[in-house]
Image (cartoon, grey):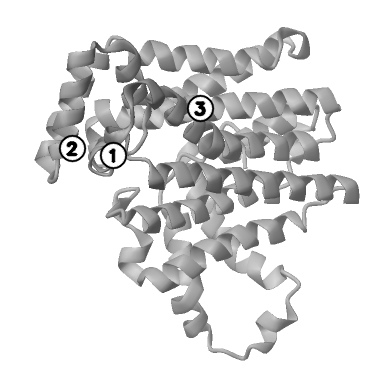
Amino acid sequence: MSSNAPFQETGPRLVSSLGSLLQELPSSLWSEARVDSEIWDSALLDPARDILNRTGKGLRARLVERSWRLAGGDPGQVPELLPLAIEVLHAGSLVIDDIEDDSRLRRGQPAIHRTYGLPIALNMGNWLYFLALALLSRVPVAHEIRLALYEDVSLALLLCHQGQALDLSVRITSAKRGDVHALVAGATRLKTGSLTRLAALLGARAAEGYPDTVEAIGRFGAELGVGLQMLDDWSGVSVAKRRAKGIEDVRLARPTWPWAWLAETGDEFAYAETVRQARKAKIDWEAELVLDRMRSQLESIAPARIRRQLDTAVRTLGRERLAPSERDEVRDYVDRLERAFG
């Protein structure tokens, strides 16, 4: 998988590899189950192929590859299963998130639980978590590195679920204005930050980078994750084709970055009025009015906040660790990532 390929190629590549990977996994129980392949398809593989085949940005897969190179790995020798594992894990998290939020759409199509039913979707989403671990078991690295990769995954999953707990339990329209930024930042660092940190660590650790280099690349991933979430949240407000995501955020009163920026920069009356409108938003057009209000208040602020966060992510790598060509490559990667949300 070339790091210069379009982000959107990742999904189809995953699907094309899925069937052969399943056959290669060392599981006698799989082969001895003696169940017709059509049953396996309907019970597990069809919904897995569905979510993996939907066009995604593949940002985390690219981050694995980029981190491998930054840690000194041969650009042409990135183990294929590393970026595959992070995208499989991420896909599982999307399925579970959509169940918990009862989302209607995922990547422009009906959410998996709405097509296949909640029980099958829930089981398959969890199965993708464990498939990611099974894929890591086949990455050609030393035993101690594999153990460290498992520990990285374990911690990331723990923190992601803690962040999801905030998303599910906190309605931003009921939070005190002074608490909003901390709530949004905390949920972001636990969820998106932890998962992008994991992607960075998988590549850097598997490349056998020096410990301080691996740690710096992990910090880069975590800070980049915050920037990713900012981009995702703001695009739901500012980009027409992403409005469905923004509407869902408003109706579920999710703790998103536009709310954090409004709480910090808007005057008290303007913030209270936006909250009042959001509380009343029961149908899509009412939520769209809230998004319009947010955009008018934040369009001169949000892009600069996002750019500052992305610059912070790049700085965590430290100039002394990067050759000029590597700095240019990292900056190009971050710029492409930002454009992918526009």
Earlier in the chain: of badge 3 and badge 1, it is: 3
The amino acid marked with disc number 1 is: Ala
Name above or below for residue 182 compared with residue 115: above
Viewer-closest of 53 and 299: 299
Q: Which label was assigned to residue 62?
A: none
Q: Residues within 10 Å of mark 2 (few under 14, many from 20)?
A: many
Q: Residue at x 48, y 84 (%)?
A: 39
Q: Residue at x 21, y 29 (%)?
A: 275
Q: CA distance from mark 3 to mark 2?
A: 26 Å
Q: Which residue is mark 1?
A: 253
**Residue at the extreme left of the image, as rendered:** 285
Earlier in the chain: of badge 3 and badge 2, it is: 3
Report the mark closest to the observer, 3 or 1.
1
Earlier in the chain: of badge 1 and badge 2, it is: 1
The amino acid marked with disc number 3 is: Val
Q: Position of residue 73 (x, y in %)?
A: 79, 32
Q: Residue at x 79, y 37 (%)?
A: 205
Q: Which label was assigned to residue 279?
A: 2
Quarter of image, res 195? top right
In the rendered structure, the answer to whether residue 145 lies left or right of residue 177 reads: right
Secondary structure under tag 3 reads helix
Q: Position of residue 12 (x, y in %)?
A: 49, 53
